[in-house]
Amino acid sequence: MFTGLIERTGTVKKFFQSGEFYTLAIEAENFSGELVKGQSVSVSGACLTVTRNDSKSFDVQMMRETFNRTWFGKSLRAGTKLNLERAMRLTDRLDGHLVLGHVDGVAKLTELKGTSVKEAFFAPEDRNLLRGIVEKGSVAIDGISLTVINVSSKNFSVGLIPETLAGTTLGNIKPGNFVNLETDILGKYVARLTGYNSERENGNYLASLLEM
């Protein structure tokens, strides 16, 4: 489990398929040396397992499900920048929100407004994911804990402050780029417990539940 507060960014060295798995080698000095083989690490929002590490780089493995559900299968290559976060400890402050690292799908940046403080609009490939996103709620974008500003039937927007732009991969994002999206786990449990399902037509169903 993670908080959505990015510790640093890393750079892809290699990305290749090995049997039923995909192996991703990431260069991340002053981060890799603190990892342990078998440990979980968030890589741009996806919880992956460390299989090798030294003081300058580390390897993680992913299943085909992760490859298909994330943007990794679309545009991951050597030189790509990734957001990195180690798993939280029970004694840590929860400064972001509870992020599992279980990516729900991908979203495309459609518009970017502002200068030093920006409002970014994202459209999920699966519109059903919008039903798990509520105004002023939390969402993880490429592993980053962000607060939702607005939600419509087609997209949602979040605010990006200078600290986020400087310390994560979102500082270089452009319209048309894809990101990994994880909706709030609390909303998922509310949906499950209330019998909500993907066939409902009301996109504001979860929001109306929270207002009750």
Image: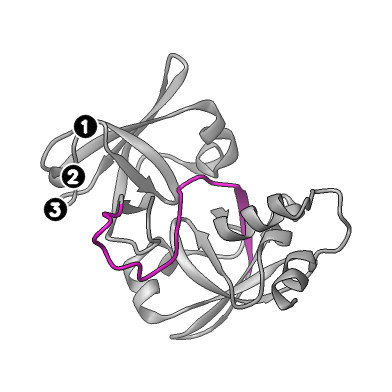
Q: Which residues are magenta?
A: 88-110
The type of residue carrying mark 3 is: Asn
Relative to 115, 151 lies left or right: right
Image location (x, y in percent) of residue 97: 44, 65
Mark 2: few/some/many CA within 10 Å (<14, 14-19, 20+): many
Q: Earlier in the sequence, mark 2 or mark 1?
A: 2
**1 part of magenta stretch:** no
Q: Of 167 and 34, which appears nearest the observer?
A: 34
Relative to 200, 64 lies left or right: left
Residue 30 marker: 3
For image coordinates 62% across by 73% down, the residue present is: 157
Residue 37 marker: 1
For image coordinates 35% across by 71% down, the residue present is: 95
* In this view, 159 is above or below 174: below
CA gap between label 3 and label 2 equals 6 Å
In the picture of the structure, the residue carrying the numbered disc 2 is: 32
* In this view, 114 is above or below 201: below
Mark 1: few/some/many CA within 10 Å (<14, 14-19, 20+): few
CA gap between label 1 and label 3 equals 16 Å
Relative to 144, 204 lies left or right: right
